[in-house]
Image (tube, grey):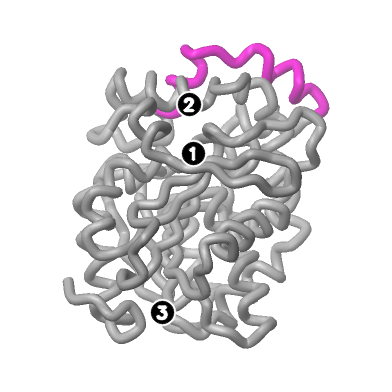
Amino acid sequence: MQPHQWLTNGQWFNCQSYQLFYADSAPNNQEKPVLLLIHGFPTSSFDWQKVWPHLTKYFRCIAMDMLGFGYSDKPKEHHYSIHGQADLNERLLHLLGINSAHILAHDYGDTVAQELLTRANAEGNTRYPSVSLLNGGLFPETHQPRLIQKLLLSSIGPLVNRLIGYPQFCRSFRAIFGPRTQPSAADLQDLWQILQYNKGGYHLYKLITYMRDRRQHRQRWVDALNNYPGPLQLINGSLDPVSGRHMVERFRQLINRPANIAEFSEIGHYPQWEAPDLLVSNYLEFIETYSNKAAQISV
């Protein structure tokens, strides 16, 4: 699917005076279980397009472009935060009349999912019947940001941001993919096109503050995983230099509850892009094994 097709097939909702884009695979279907997909930084809901046709066979899939990303509004003076993005995901589910949704998240989206779980745990509800997390900085002490991320977060972030062009973007992305699962030229062009939509590439230094959020709220978000009562899965591309094998080791040290861990030894940071079929098969097996009753599906 091309970016223009993704955009054409999507929908919009307004929240806090902002217009936000989202994809909903079955707006009128009340029978399928809902799967909320939460994208990473600096990309968008388009990240899920390679797994979308498979997952929508079993789920009503919903994926928004969070504020500042993709086709959603990108306010220049906004203070972006993980808490704010969690608010928007909750708002979308509320507007759609959805009280229960499985979560599949990646990267930045993992942290948003951790905040959603924190709130649900505190309320003692089970609105998220299962949670699956792809490569992401679940623990700030094991997150190994790329140099460009460190520079964007620094005092010279605005200047560095203005210097980022397509060649730099391509180098950065290729560096976090596995050597055998590199993005194609067309893939990179698609991702760059969406990143640049509505001048989105010019405020990455504002979005990158999520790295500070992770440090500030570390215990809150580690507790979210340990206290979550439902089925939990971690899918990880081992070759990811940012949050690969080393993050899984830390997960095993800190998370003292059962979890399904799937390690993909030959891929990097983007399992849903590098190995979509493998991701889908592992995810559906997880759902069938650990939460078939909650999902009410047969795979």
Q: Position of residue 262 (x, y in %)?
A: 31, 64
Check disc 2 and report the residue beneath it. 194
Mark 1 touching mark 2, by CB under 8 A? Answer: yes
Indicate which label's residue lies in the foreground, 3 or 1: 1
Q: Quadrant of residue 176?
A: top left
> Of callouts 3 and 2, which one flags the residue occurring earlier in the amino acid sequence?
2
In the image, which disc is placed on residue 44?
1
Which amino acid type is marked by label 1?
Ser
Which amino acid type is marked by label 3?
Pro
Image position of 77 with respect to 85: above or below: above
Magenta residues span 155-173
68 sits left or right of 167 in the view: right
| Magenta stretch: helix, strand or loop mostly | helix
Q: Position of residue 201 (x, y in %)?
A: 60, 22
**Residue 146 versus residue 221: which sits nearer the camera?**
221
Image quadrant containing the C terminus:
bottom left
Residue at coordinates 50% horizontally, 69% vertically from top-left?
A: 98
Q: Residues within 10 Å of mark 1 (few under 14, many from 20)?
A: many
Image position of 167 with respect to 291: above or below: above
Residue at coordinates 40% horizontally, 63% vertically from top-left?
A: 35
Find numbered disc 2 in the image and state the secondary structure of the residue it sits on: helix
Check disc 3 and report the residue beneath it. 231
> Of callouts 1 and 2, which one flags the residue occurring earlier in the amino acid sequence?
1
Q: Residue furthest left?
A: 299
Mark 3 touching mark 2, by CB under 8 A? Answer: no
Image quadrant containing the N terminus:
top left
